[in-house]
Amino acid sequence: MTDLALDLPGAAKRPSTARALLRWLIGHPPVITLGLIVLVSLVVGAISPEFWQVSNLFDMARASVVSGLFGLGVLIVLATGGLDVSFTAIAALTMYVITKTVTDYAPGTPIAVILACGAAGGALIGALNGQLVHSLKAPSLIVTIGTQYVIRGFLLTFIGTGLFMNIPLSMEAFGKYELWRSEAGNGSIAILPAYVLVLVVVSVVTWWILNRTLIGRAVYAVGGSPAIAERLGYNLRKVRVFAFMYAGLLAGIAGIIHVSSNRLANPFDLAGSELDVIAAVVLGGARITGGSGSVVGTLLGVVLVTLINNVLILAGVPSTWQKVIVGIFIVLAGTLFALRVSR
């Protein structure tokens, strides 16, 4: 009926409801990611009712903190049209060096100072990344692969592979602070750690930077078209250095939180999780070519990847298939984004 009406002479052709809905979904990738989260949750919850236990939901929230901090940093770098794969190495270096230094020379240092040192150390390395990307005119992927190898090589040469289990008391206490405690009928206790608030605060700050500041507009402008952004008066060097510096800052904070929550410093922790984080940001709607992406979409992407990596085991899905499922989702997301660009 609708198609016949659209074919009447003189009538303006309008898209069908289904096509209009599809176009709207393609233009709003976070909605698709949210739909996938709901779908996966319902399927896994139906197969394994333990999924809806409070302890499991708290575990997922805890597992999302470090990935979420990494993801927000990657979001800003991707929005500028760059790509950073060195953030886990930055986190490993800052967390190990700061933990060992504080333990050996200033064991009474408050956690606020330790977090500030982690943020400053990460920001310094990130700013170096940004300066190298701009000065060398080289792809940021190549530059950050080089940085990652330098840092990993430094850790292997001067520190080795030994674990560091004696962390400062302030870090240990920070990892144990409780935001919420829930006791089930069988007596089991589930605890939501207070450090999840760090991700909440960082998310608000990142949203404010991207949507309410000049540097946020510059980030999207440079990612959309560097040549046009430069003609409009944006300083490409400052924008790129800021983006990589912010990603490094968040990586430094994530490293300290990782040590505090695990009460263990391993110089080679977090290695290999880069693709999961980048996948989460892409699934949240950020284009790999830059100029787009949102905080809400990134957080939804992190939740989706956390679901796949940590919860499918409840449904009896072998861990080897988790990467396959993440890959399928990434291909689907890439296809939708290609449609968004070509329409």
Image (spheres, rainbow, N blue to C red):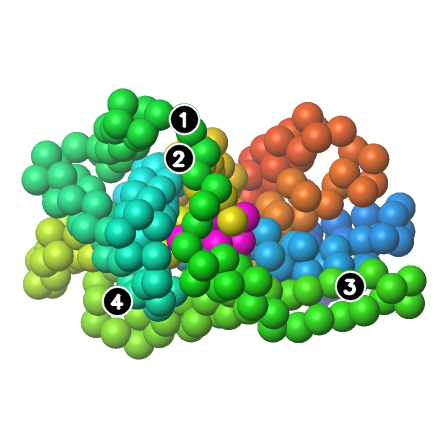
Q: Earlier in the sequence, mark 4 or mark 3?
A: 3
Give percent across and percent down for residue 102.
31, 53
Sort mark 3 into few (<14), some (14-19) or many (20+) by Cα contacts within 10 Å. few
Q: Nearer the viewer, residue 21 or 325?
A: 325
What residue appears at the point 26 percent right and 67 percent down from the top-left corner? 217
* Numbered range of the magenta stretch: 256-262
Asked if the residue at tag 2 contacts the one at tag 1, i.e. Cβ–Cβ closer than 8 Å, the answer is yes
Identity of the residue furthest to the right in this view:
186
Query: Which disc, if any, is residue 267?
Result: 2
Residue type, numbered disc 1:
Thr
Give percent across and percent down for residue 91.
36, 45
Identify residue for label 3. Answer: 189
What residue appears at the point 41 percent right and 26 percent down from the top-left corner? 161
Residue type, numbered disc 3:
Ile
Q: CA distance from mark 1 to mark 3?
A: 34 Å
Location of the N terminus (image quadrant): bottom right
Front of the two marks 2 and 4? 2
Q: CA distance from mark 4 to mark 1?
A: 42 Å
Q: CA distance from mark 1 to mark 2?
A: 7 Å
Q: Nearer the viewer, residue 247 or 297?
A: 247
**Quick check: 188 left or right of 129?**
right
Q: Earlier in the sequence, mark 2 or mark 4?
A: 4
